[in-house]
Image: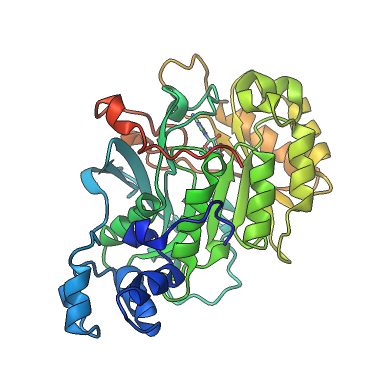
């Protein structure tokens, strides 16, 4: 693990413990090593949080586990269902309210695969998968309450960063989302594209990723997980190294050059377009995988034909695909999304230059669940209480 400072596993929330952490905790209670995996399996593979139901554990251990809070540290405040089947769950955490979004990957009848732009992550079909496509669900989750990045077109950072979520709160979003699956639905992809900047909160995000992908737990495939970043270069390097490039990466570029990008992404002052592209070139991508370049199209800002040409040029040597996102309306931003003709023309140009380029279908915007619409919704508790809770890690 390269999760930074060593922590006593007993101090981790039970849902943030990996089997090796449980080994340490349970060894202190005189339990053999194999119990660790049993407990981990109950919590993550079975979603069983009540120790009395953990039938293969000896009674004294079950008894002992009742003294721990094994429950998911989140409550569902409300569920908003969009016309297209997208569900936004508003979750109440300790001093934070975050949103995660369940997106069924239903493809309208007769539409070609390339048009299934819901394909947020690499949704290749070369992996055996029993679930029919219509039942696959992508979960978009949050890593922070608020966000420190301040991108001008995004509602999440309006009030700055309140606090980062703990690993167990990130894991909890997945566990709760699973309970909201409808019959026949199956959670297939995870995208870290909700509120917050995952690489500005690396340690907790990485721990959650390890828990979620562990073979004894939910066993989610790293290739079906995409972490989206504004382009924090040290974080990109660290993610690539720690997970051997297996976790999918999406980068919010939004501009082909620094002059345009600086107007909309303040972080560009720290890491330039060239810095980011250099980090992408070094990302240890597995064969046949590509990095996603996210590009939010804003009318009159970054949507001109020459921007498309320049984008294709700067990305030429990288293994990427471009995901265009017509900007969703965000109150008070004073910006507008590019009109459909403009989006189509932009896509055309990038594609003609030889890059794969898709337009992301807008999902869930009638319940403000679309990209950039997950907003900070006011303070919940006395800020003094938040002190010490907010483990918003410094940038890696
Ligand atoms: N902080 C991460 C992940 C969060 S946002 C990142 O920056 O990538 C997920 C994607 O939605 C990003 O590409 C983000 O730039 C985009 N986005 C934010 N606001 C948007 C808006 N109003 N319309 C369209 N896309 C938006």
For the N terminus, give its image quadrant: bottom right
Answer above or below: position of 316 versus 149.
below
Residue 322 seen in this snapshot? no
Q: Is residue 51 left or right of residue 246?
A: left
Residue 253 seen in this snapshot? yes
Whole-percent x, y for residue 66 in the image: 18, 67
Whole-percent x, y for residue 293 in the image: 66, 43
Whole-percent x, y for residue 42 in the image: 30, 74
Q: Between residues 132 and 243, which one lies in front from this camera angle?
A: 243
**Tell me, what colour scheme is on the image?**
rainbow
* Residue sitting at x 28%, y 68%: 47
Q: Is residue 60 left or right of residue 389?
A: left
* Residue sitting at x 43%, y 38%: 195
Whole-percent x, y for residue 123 in the image: 56, 61
Q: Between residues 57 and 7, which one lies in front from this camera angle?
A: 7
Answer above or below: position of 66 versus 362.
below
* Residue sitting at x 40%, y 35%: 163
Q: Is residue 91 left or right of residue 305?
A: left
For the C terminus, give its image quadrant: top right
Q: Between residues 183 and 21, which one lies in front from this camera angle?
A: 21
What is the quadrant of residue 194 in the picture? top left
């Amino acid at each position: 693990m390269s999760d930074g400072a060593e922590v006593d596993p007993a101090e981790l929330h039970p849902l943030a413990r990996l089997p090796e952490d449980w080994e340490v905790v349970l060894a202190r209670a005189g339990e053999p090593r194999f119990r660790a995996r049993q407990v981990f399996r109950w919590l993550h593979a079975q979603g069983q949080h009540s120790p009395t139901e953990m039938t293969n554990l000896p009674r004294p251990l079950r008894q002992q586990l009742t003294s721990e809070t094994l429950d998911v540290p989140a409550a569902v405040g409300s569920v908003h269902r969009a016309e297209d089947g997208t569900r936004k769950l508003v979750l109440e955490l300790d001093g934070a309210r975050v949103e995660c979004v369940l997106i069924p990957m239903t493809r309208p009848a007769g539409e070609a695969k390339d048009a299934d732009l819901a394909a947020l992550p690499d949704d290749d079909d070369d992996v055996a998968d029993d679930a029919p496509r219509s039942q696959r669900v992508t979960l978009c989750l949050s890593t922070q309450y608020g966000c420190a990045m301040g991108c001008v077109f995004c509602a999440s950072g309006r009030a700055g960063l309140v606090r980062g979520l703990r690993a167990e709160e990130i894991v909890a979003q997945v566990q709760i989302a699973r309970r909201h699956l409808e019959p026949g639905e199956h959670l297939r992809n995870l995208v870290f594209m909700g509120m917050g900047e995952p690489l500005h909160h690396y340690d907790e995000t990485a721990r959650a990723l390890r828990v979620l992908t562990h073979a004894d737990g939910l066993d989610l495939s790293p290739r079906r997980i995409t972490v989206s970043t504004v382009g924090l270069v040290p974080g990109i390097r660290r993610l690539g190294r720690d997970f051997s490039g297996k976790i999918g990466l999406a980068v919010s570029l939004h501009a082909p050059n620094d002059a345009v990008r600086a107007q909309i992404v303040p972080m560009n002052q720290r890491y330039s377009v060239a810095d980011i592209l250099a980090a992408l070139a070094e990302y240890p991508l597995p064969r046949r995988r590509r990095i996603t370049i996210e590009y939010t199209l804003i009318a009159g800002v970054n949507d001109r034909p020459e921007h498309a040409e320049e984008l294709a040029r700067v990305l030429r040597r990288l293994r990427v695909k471009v995901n265009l996102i017509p900007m969703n309306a965000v109150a008070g931003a004073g910006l507008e999304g590019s009109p459909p003709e403009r989006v189509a023309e932009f896509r055309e140009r990038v594609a003609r230059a030889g890059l794969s380029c898709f337009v992301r279908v807008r999902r869930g915007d009638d319940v403000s669940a679309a990209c950039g619409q997950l907003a900070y919704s006011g303070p919940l508790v006395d800020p003094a209480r938040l002190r010490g809770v907010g483990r918003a890690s410094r940038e890696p």
